[in-house]
Amino acid sequence: MEPNVEAHIAALAESKHRPVWFESDDMLEPLPPLNGDATCELLIIGGGFTGLWAALQAKERMPDLNIILVEQTFVGDGASGRNGGFLSSSLTHGETNGDYHFPGEAEQLYELGQQNMKEFIETLERYNIDAEYEAVGSTSVATNDAMVAQLRKEYEASKAAGDDVVWFDRDDMRRQVNSPTYLAGVWWRDGQDGVVHPAKLCWGLKKTILSLGVRIFEGTPVNNIAEDGDGMRSTCDSGNVHSGKILMATNAFPGLLPQMRRQVIPVWDYQIATEPLNDEQLASIGWGESRHALSNAANMFHYYRITKDNRITWGGGGSICYYYGSRTDQSVADDPARFKRLAREFLETFPQLEGVKFTNRWSGIIASSTRFCVVPGVTFNGRVSWAIGYTGLGVGATRFGARMGLELLGYQPSEVLDMVFIKRRAMSWFPEPLRWIGVTLTRHALSKADANGGKRGLWLKILDFFHMGFAC
Ligand SMILES: Cc1cc2nc3c(=O)[nH]c(=O)nc-3n(C[C@H](O)[C@H](O)[C@H](O)COP(=O)(O)OP(=O)(O)OC[C@H]3O[C@@H](n4cnc5c(N)ncnc54)[C@H](O)[C@@H]3O)c2cc1C
């Protein structure tokens, strides 16, 4: 049978431009904005995972601390309510990237990542936060011979390191999840990695910190921060907040300080989600049994998973994009070409699902740093800190980023602050137009490497030499 070339367009026709995660009865109404002036000891700016975890950990460490959290739109409206929900214990966007940027600290970072994840899951249990956590590990698939060779190397290395890891050859992999594109796969099934419902995690954290006495103002953008006696003043549209300290958790959005704006760039990532699959559709891919959290072993990789109600969410690949001038405005949020590309690639992977409808399409902004993992910072004599730039892996790492932000403000600092991971200044991104040229060249070079069986061309080799290549 000839493939229906328009099938992907038809499948998208009735989709809503809204994260599938927001289609839940649990979605919370935003709280009222700040109205007038307010005072607190710690002001947290940003209502994503970093800000929410910062508030929660601060309250656990110092129950009497007077905390306000302000969010410019609503809690979970940033990357935290829009991501794929892949939960990884890695703090460094993968071990390879960690070894590359922080040689000598790999073991400590691994241990800290494991501890962070353990505490993360214990916190969900302690406060009854139903984030639909499933400990399914992570699974990487190969769709060409070069990827098979690369995955095999990763599998051998993981096995030698004692990880609980499973190799699937072509037929085994297709028995797990049935795609004619799969040639092999590796399942890292040990540990605590898995998937969550990201928006439910945001809402659960929000409810928890409210119950612990944190005041939250939504619809409250902070426009400026300045010294104010021995504290800080944050100017919002509808009033000022006077605080002893500030933790900024604004990630990809324009930073309130110039050094923050140089440390991260906003990279748009697009996703689609299917309607809940029926039994026949589920049986045709076999995925309902294994519930793997999948990605392919490419530079410009797709990530996809199955939700509790048996939808597939699908994102990444060549749709990921940086727009000239570090754009974060909504005008690029609903880009039909990117969604069509995602839908087409989805149906190439699962042709047996032709006829399935995509109910939701959406996008979000990843904050990419030059080290491809969180960048902490502190200024104003220890009164203002930040943790931003998790690149594409922040669902788990934001809890640790929040901890760093708190410790940098002097709240129960630990030996973690002595690590190169925290102390080394992240290289700044170049200004425009070099920024756009560099990122665009890199995107093309990564796609080309994928098409050439992983062979890195001259541009990527230059970046690798200067430790600026993404080595995930
Ligand atoms: C499409 C997509 C898919 C992803 N998939 C995954 C994944 O599967 N696994 C994974 O580990 N990571 C993933 N990530 C990355 C992960 O979502 C982020 O690293 C993480 O959510 C960052 O959390 P955050 O709180 O630091 O930032 P955000 O969630 O972006 O929160 C920042 C908040 O600050 C607010 N804000 C900004 N400026 C101001 C201001 N001046 N005043 C008041 N408020 C302000 C914003 O409105 C926003 O709500 C993905 C990201 C995207 C975009």
Image (cartoon, rainbow, N blue to C red):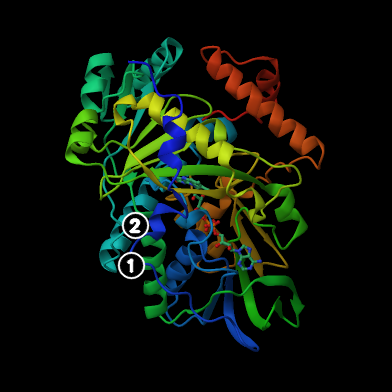
Secondary structure under tag 2 reads helix
**Furthest-bottom residue in view?**
36
Q: Nearer the viewer, residue 207 or 288?
A: 288
Query: With 90 as the anchor, is 246 left or right in this view?
Result: right
Q: Nearer the viewer, residue 214 or 363?
A: 363
* Image disc number at residue 12: none
Tell me where residue 319 sits by quadrant: top right
The x, y position of residue 274, in whole percent, is 35, 43
Secondary structure under tag 1 reads loop
State the residue at coordinates (28%, 15%). Answer: 170
Figure check: 113 above or below 459: below
Mark 1: give few (<14), some (14-19) or many (20+) Cα within 10 Å. Answer: few
Task: Work out whether residue 87 can be spotted.
Answer: no
State the residue at coordinates (72%, 47%). Answer: 326
Using the numbered discs, state the Cα–Cα distance from disc 2 to disc 1 in whole angstroms. 24 Å
State the residue at coordinates (23%, 15%). Answer: 171
Q: Quadrant of the N terminus?
A: top left
Disc 1 residue type (three-letter): Asp
The x, y position of residue 190, in whole percent, is 26, 36
Figure check: 182 above or below 433: above
Mark 2: give few (<14), some (14-19) or many (20+) Cα within 10 Å. Answer: some
Question: In this figure, which residue is indicated by the disc labeled 1?
Answer: 26
Disc 2 residue type (three-letter): Glu
The mark nearer the N terminus, 2 or 1, is: 1
Task: Work out whether residue 219 can be spotted.
Answer: yes
Mark 1 residue CB less than 8 A from any atom of ligand 1: no
Tell me where residue 143 sits by quadrant: top left
The x, y position of residue 59, in whole percent, is 43, 74
Question: In this figure, which residue is indicated by the disc labeled 2?
Answer: 119
In front: label 2 or label 1: 1
Q: Nearer the viewer, residue 322 or 123?
A: 322
Query: With 23 as the anchor, is 418 left or right in this view?
Result: right
